[in-house]
Image (cartoon, rainbow, N blue to C red):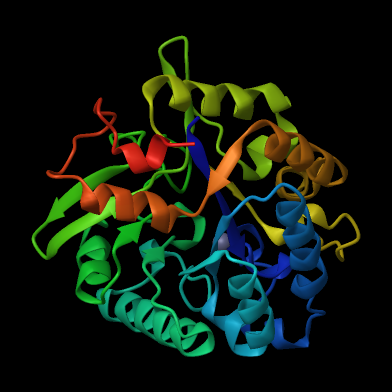
Amino acid sequence: MIAHHFTIDLEEYFQVSAFASRVARSEWRHLESRVVGEVTSLLELLARHEARATVFVLGWVAERQPELVRTIARAGHEIASHGWDHARVTDQTPPQVRQSIRRTKALLEEITGAPVLGFRAPSFSIVPGGEWALDILIEEGYRYDSSLFPVRRPGYGYPNGAPDPHWLERPAGRLAEIPPSTLQWCGLRLPAAGGAYFRLLPYDVVRAALRQCERRGVPGTFYIHPWELDPAQPRLAVSWLTRLRHYGGLRRTAQRLERLLAEFRFIAVRDTVAALSAAPAPRPAGAAGWPAAVTAP
Ligand SMILES: [Zn+2]
């Protein structure tokens, strides 16, 4: 039985990129924090199903909620980095990206005492032309990235990226890439990995994407945000489209997660990366002969 990746981008409801024009970073500290309650629900859900997650934590949140980060790590989940203040890579200079990922890694390692191996860019914002950010990750000691969403979407996406976990050979060295899952459908590759797609599309879309990964013999990667389990979060005045994407289906999330966690087995990304690293040679995307440690029950 293939074990998939259950990933969480740990940020507050007001930090999503779609709200950036409405909520200035300078206002963040005045807004109600809701992550503790939201993450507690998520941890209970994961514990009930004996699932392990990888949690990409925003440095800004970790600085204010170190005990929450420790609680997540003590529950057996992997702590990884989501950058410092949710600035998109596409909006930053290379020195700013380096500063953000260095500061976040150092803080998370100080809080948990364990090495931070993984990174996910806010809003999957490593896009074609932004590969320099991958070199900075390698130079700063990261072992894997989970930012290259192999779809074409407004504002994000890495359309020519491989859909399954693979090695990236970069001038700075080697980095494992763990892309969010997609669904092959009628010759198209569609985003189906979680988030709004999980809340707004039929549940079967995410299930089909993970089943396709199983048929290819590779783990799929699902993602969710704590605020997606929080129908009571304060509503911000945003456009109807943003309202639909952010607030649509919030009441369905917990029930759908129960179903997903009952149907599939989940491990942390670091376990897959360890198995990939133990394999004798770098493997191309979707290659047969995935390391046994990844596919063993
Ligand atoms: Zn995020």
- The residue shown at (53%, 26%) is 209
| Res. 114 visible in picture | yes
* Number of numbered tags placed on the structure image: 0
Find the residue positioned furthest to the top. Answer: 186
Note whether 122 is above or below 217 in the view shown.
below
Q: Which of 2 and 23 is in front in this view?
A: 2
- The residue shown at (53%, 23%) is 211
Note whether 191 is above or below 6 in the view shown.
above
In-image side of 149 versus 98 (left or right): right
Q: In which quarter of the image is residue 201?
A: top right
Find the residue positioned furthest to the left. Answer: 171
Q: In which quarter of the image is residue 184?
A: top left
In-image side of 131 versus 261 (left or right): left
Q: Where is residue 93 in the image (x, y as percent from the top left)?
A: 30, 74
Q: Which of 243 and 120 is in front in this view?
A: 120
- The residue shown at (25%, 61%) is 134
Note whether 60 is above or below 273 in the view shown.
below
Note whether 8 is above or below 178 in the view shown.
below
Find the residue positioned furthest to the right. Answer: 232
| Res. 238 visible in picture | no
Q: Where is residue 181 in the image (x, y as percent from the top left)?
A: 48, 36
Q: Where is residue 1 in the image (x, y as percent from the top left)?
A: 50, 30
In-image side of 145 versus 133 (left or right): right
Q: In which quarter of the image is ligand 1?
A: bottom right
In-image side of 238 versus 108 (left or right): right
Q: Nearer the viewer, residue 99 or 217?
A: 217
Q: Position of residue 261 (x, y in %)?
A: 69, 40
